[in-house]
Amino acid sequence: MPIQELTDKLKLNAFYTALIEQETQPAYSELPFEKRVQMLLEAEVLERDNKRLQRLVKQAKLHERGANISEINFSPDRNLDKSVILDLAGGNYIKYFRNIILTGPTGSGKSYIAQAYANKAMSMGYSALYVRVPRLMQYLQAIRGDEEYLKYLAKLKRINLLILDDFGVSPLKAVEARDLLEIVEDRVNQSSLIVTSQLAIKDWHGYLHNATIADAILDRIVHNAYKIEFKGDADSQRKKNAKEAMK
């Protein structure tokens, strides 16, 4: 059987492409056989890693696809501890199923950092998904009572890192708080959350409508979370970024 048929059958497309390149470049003939095979296998691994990352990025639905830890602004007025931010970027919080809570004024950069963490996590092979809480509640309301509702909750459960953006923008209805509890409960000791909110954590209880449900949700999100509070001034981080882009 021809080599190409074998590589096609084994889905080693990058391997075969790299092999053709070796055959057309005389310099490769000077390398040991083991080294040439290693390079072929490395080409295949790289191709598969790239395709997996592309799938993860598409699935994550980030608004800031280019969000990068290296581009975070650590100016003093933001009250960010650089050592903490960079340490979390290492991904151990996902490994140990811990959460991150980012609180502060609108436009202060919470969502950007959350999505930068998602990009970093995906580069390490973790799956991620970005959702705004108001939009999530609307979607769950639309599918509640259908088989799709349970399928969607199961999908969320499988995600290694779930970003809940704009938590606390408007009070949750009782049924929405119960939905949130289901989502959070599924993730305890299984996966991680990043929650961004304009509300200080001390104000979350009132936002969650029912005291019993609020206690249950806060216990599952807050007790094992890294908490980062942003400071802001009259000019939001978003406006500053826009001004820099204009320049």
Image (cartoon, rainbow, N blue to C red):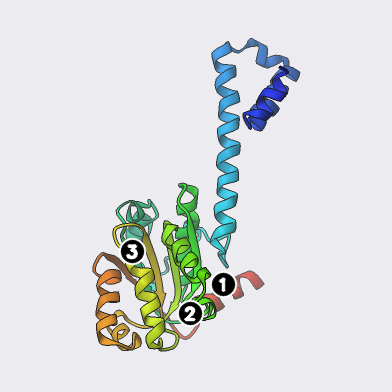
Disc 3 marks which residue? 99
Q: Residues within 10 Å of mark 3 (few under 14, many from 20)?
A: many
The residue wearing badge 2 is 137
In this rendering, the label closer to the viewer, 3 or 2: 2
The reply to whether discs 3 and 2 touch (Cβ–Cβ < 8 Å) is no
Is residue 210 visible in the rendered image? The answer is yes
Q: Position of residue 172 (x, y in %)?
A: 40, 86
Residue in the picture at 59% in, 18% down: 36
Q: Work out how far the residue at label 3 is from the one at label 2, CA to CA, in angstroms.
A: 21 Å
Q: Residue at x 45, y 67 (%)?
A: 153
**First-in-chain label (3 vs 1):** 3
Q: Nearer the viewer, residue 212 or 65?
A: 212
Measured from the top left, where is residue 13 in percent x and y? 67, 32
Picture coordinates of residue 95 (x, y %)?
Answer: 33, 51
| Residue type for callout 3 | Asn
Q: Nearer the viewer, residue 145 or 102?
A: 145
* Residue 188 position within the rendered picture, expressed as x and y whole percent measured from the top left: 30, 62
Q: Amino acid at mark 1?
A: Asn
Q: Residue at x 57, y 68 (%)?
A: 63
Element type at mark 3:
strand
Q: Secondary structure at mark 1?
A: helix
The 10 Å Cα crowd at callout 2, few under 14, some 14 to 19, many 20 or more, is: some
Position of residue 73 relative to residue 175, above or below, is above
